[in-house]
Amino acid sequence: MRSDLPRWIDVGVIPAVNILLAFLVAGLVVLVAGESPLDALVVLATGAFGYDEAIGYTLYYATNLVFTGLAVAVAFHAGLFNIGGEGQAYLGGLGAGLAALSLDASLPAWAMVPVAMAASGLFGAAWAFIPGWLQAHRGSHVVITTIMFNFLASALMVHLLVNVLIQPGQMSPESREFAPTAWIPFVHEVLAGVGITVARSPLNLSILWAAAACVFVWLLINRTRWGYAIRTVGHNEAAAVYAGIDPKAVIVGSMCISGALAGFVGINEMLGVQHRLLLNFTAGYGFTGIAVALMGRAHPVGIVLASLLFGALYQGGTELDFEFDGITRDLVVVIQGLVILFSGALAYMMHPIALRLWRGRRRESAP
Amino acid sequence: MSDTLLLLVLTLDATLRVAAPLVLVAMAGLFSERSGVVDIGLEGKMLAGAFAAAATAAVTGSAWLGLLVAVAVSAALALLHGLACITYRGNQVVSGVAVNILAAGLTVVLGIAWFDQGGQTPPLGQAARFAPIELPLADLLHDVPVIGHLYHELLSGHNLLVYVALASVPATWWVVYRTRFGLRLRAVGETPAAVDTAGVSVEWLRYRAVLITGALCGVAGAYLSTAQSAGFVRDMTAGKGYIALAALIFGKWRPVPAFLACLLFGFLDAVATRLQGVEIPGYGQAPVALIQALPYALTVVLLAGFIGKAVAPKAIGVPYVKER
């Protein structure tokens, strides 16, 4: 579609300019808030990468964002907008938690952890299956239904934790702690086992699963018949029908894959860090996943880079609270909104400008 | 008067208060969506409006100035949405999400920078808020059985913006179905090419629709922070924009059914609030969270086509490209 610009401008320069614009506007917001944008940037960067522990936290946040970013991306490829990552991640956590709560006494760790992981994917997929099926077979728009399902997930979790799963004799709505058989080891523990000391952080081996998910999504989209079907439906549903592809099956299938990927947030959060079911652990990762997917242009490599950036912003943002009176970590939310605005909604704004510049340069250099 | 009746009147009274912002936002969304522009960003515009109203009222002491600034700020966000969707033909859902997240972040960052109260605005005094209004003859009719009582308890004694919300329904109906602008608005949401052929600018029509959306969202925001409450707290819209969107869809993008859907959703919310902590015999704690989720569940069921079919404007979400 954009073959009129060379690939390096389309994939490299324009996204970079969009991100730059987002940060410039965020800098203006910092100025309005009465602080120095440069100081804020320095604090963000040192907060994210300045020391061992910070790097661990950055990678831990990035793990969640890889899952939700991939989830949005897979749906994008099928021409669907899955805003329901938040709810699917919530349900994924519920799946992992329920599996752990019911089986942690009877299964050894090598069986318990995979079962809980599978449960998180299944629950996430199930929560995306309904909107997917309704879109394919009843024509109800997936954007609206996934928004509704986010709220339904939240209500369901509040109900379950307040009225059903709450540990007796306790005020806060949390389940009991899982037995250690259902825990995924922390990276600092694993590294300590082989004699390397790193600072404690919530970073755990779920990050390997996130890496595997990236490879899986790349293979799925680019190297399988299914991926071809997904991309065909995404580009042109009518053409897909003539190519012998059943768009309904593709829509339902890609929503399920998308939901499962979002559900994997539950692995990192429940099995890796919290070790019990609680409320609000999704903390907006599902929505940030939209920014990640847009910025990463729905490609696994881009998504990893965008997840690292946002992971760094999440972690660096906590440092803002300590260093400044006027600005807090909420600045990161502003940056996130601006990134979605510039690299998503206004994605076509820079294109004609770049085209004019590129053509002008070509004309000048031509003899 | 019997206790049950009193409880009913009180619940209906609460329904009206809860439903008022929903009605305003549903009517707001109606303009944008009937013109063919999807608006997921109702929530964000209402939130920005609530913050702008409370911040202005806190500084100037005037609720009216607050309302004015809320409308302006919300309309500015609407303009941004229009720029992305109409001029640059970007993805309308993505733009709406951006508006929501931007509003959620900016209201807190600016709130902390300006007022230093953890994202809240200073509490507003009576003068800086919209006070309850006694309707004429309310006291006089108080003793008239049923009708007079309902008039006194239910209709009278709300703040001005509740009546604005109620008035917005017939006003929207009149504009959409009885004016030239409304006819074109509906046409541009179905077949923009026909409107274009008739020599009417599709872009300008949609910009006007989106601006009306922004203005009404601003009024709803002002209602939340300067009428219903006395100040802004972070994330104070708490999903109301999405409920209003659900009501709009539930009402099949038509003013009166959307209004009734808002009342239904408001009623469910009022009931859920009343049931907080109540023991239901044979069940235990009332499942408040599940009752509050009913509007969303009902909307999904409706969208699935199991209780009537909600058909969106045909050109919704599709940027208009003029033929060259």
Image: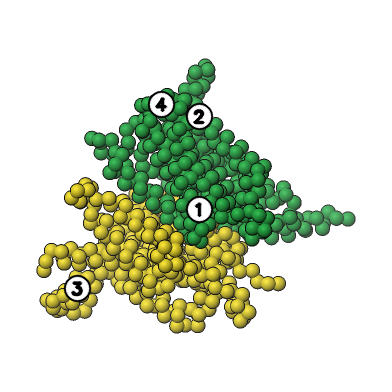
Chain colours: A green, B yellow
- Same subunit under labels 1 and 4? yes
Q: Is label 2 in a helix, a strand or a loop?
A: loop
Query: Which quadrant, please, contains the C terminus of chain B?
Result: bottom right
Disc 4 chain ID: A
Residue B240 in the image: state x and y as whole percent.
37, 59
Disc 2 chain ID: A
Q: Is label 4 in a helix, a strand or a loop?
A: loop
Residue B109 in the image: state x and y as whole percent.
43, 50
Residue B296 in the image: state x and y as whole percent.
38, 57
Lateral position of residue A199 relative to residue A216, left or right: left
Give the Cα separation between the discs numbered 3 and 1: 46 Å
Give the Cα separation between the discs numbered 2 and 1: 31 Å
Residue annotated with mark 4: A107
Q: Amino acid at mark 4?
A: Leu
Say which label, 2 or 4, has the lower sequence index: 4
Residue shown at 38% from the left, 71% from the top: B257
Give the Cα separation between the discs numbered 3 and 2: 63 Å
Q: Residues within 10 Å of mark 4 (few under 14, many from 20)?
A: some
Residue annotated with mark 2: A205
Give the Cα separation between the discs numbered 1 and 4: 34 Å
Q: Amino acid at mark 2?
A: Leu
On screen, residue B64 above or below B99: below
Residue annotated with mark 3: B150
**Would you say residue B59 is visible in this rendering?**
no
Mark 2 or mark 1: which is in front? 1
Residue annotated with mark 1: A132
Who is closer to the viewer here, A339 or A166?
A: A166
Say which label, 2 or 1, has the lower sequence index: 1
